[in-house]
C-alpha cells in the first residue's frame, strides 16, 4: 500500500457527496443528540461507591448519574 500524495488528497470528496443515498440512510439511523447535554465536572467519590458502580460494567458513570437523579426525586 502506498502513501497518499497531495494529488490523491485533492481528488478526495466527502462521503455524502459520493454516496448521498447511503449517507442519508446512515443519518436516519443516528440517535439524536441529547437535548439537555450534561455538564462535565470533576467530583470526588468514595472508593467503595466507584467500585460498586464499575462492577456493573460499562455505563457506570451513567448509572451514578441516574442514582443521583433518583436521590433528588426521592427528596421531593
Image (tube, rainbow, N blue to C red):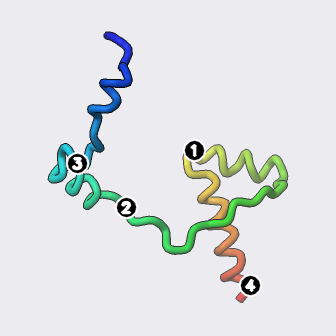
Q: Nearer the viewer, mark 3 or mark 2?
A: 3
First in sequence: mark 4 or mark 2? 2
What residue lies at 37% left-to-right and 61% top-to-bottom? 31
Q: Are marks 1 and 3 in contact (CB under 8 Å)?
A: no
Q: Residue 5's quadrant in the figure?
A: top left
First in sequence: mark 4 or mark 3? 3
First in sequence: mark 3 or mark 2? 3
* Residue 18 tag number: none
> Mark 1 and mark 2: span between their CA atoms?
22 Å
Whether 11 is drawn above or below 38: the answer is above
Q: Which residue is mark 1?
A: 57
* Residue 31 tag number: 2
In this orientation, which residue lies closer to the viewer: 20 or 34? 20
Q: Is residue 19 left or right of residue 56?
A: left
First in sequence: mark 1 or mark 4? 1
> Mark 4 and mark 3: span between their CA atoms?
52 Å
Q: Quadrant of the N terminus?
A: top left
Q: Are marks 1 and 4 in contact (CB under 8 Å)?
A: no
First in sequence: mark 1 or mark 2? 2
Q: Are marks 3 and 2 in contact (CB under 8 Å)?
A: no
Q: Residues within 10 Å of mark 4 (few under 14, many from 20)?
A: few
Q: Residues within 10 Å of mark 3 (few under 14, many from 20)?
A: few
Q: Which residue is mark 3?
A: 17
Q: Nearer the viewer, mark 1 or mark 3?
A: 3
Q: Which residue is mark 4?
A: 75
Query: What SS does tag 4 mark?
Result: helix
Q: Are marks 4 and 3 in contact (CB under 8 Å)?
A: no
Whether 76 is drawn above or below 15: the answer is below
What residue lies at 15% left-to-right and 53% top-to-bottom? 21
Query: What SS does tag 1 mark?
Result: loop
Q: Is residue 33 left or right of residue 47?
A: left
Amino acid at each position: 500500500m502506498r502513501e497518499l500524495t497531495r494529488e490523491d488528497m485533492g481528488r478526495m470528496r466527502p462521503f455524502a457527496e459520493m454516496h448521498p443515498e447511503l449517507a442519508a440512510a446512515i443519518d436516519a439511523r443516528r440517535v439524536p443528540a441529547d437535548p439537555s447535554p450534561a455538564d462535565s465536572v470533576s467530583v470526588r467519590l468514595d472508593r467503595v461507591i466507584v467500585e460498586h458502580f464499575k462492577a456493573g460494567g460499562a455505563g457506570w458513570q451513567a448509572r451514578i448519574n441516574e442514582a443521583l437523579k433518583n436521590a433528588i426525586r426521592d427528596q421531593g
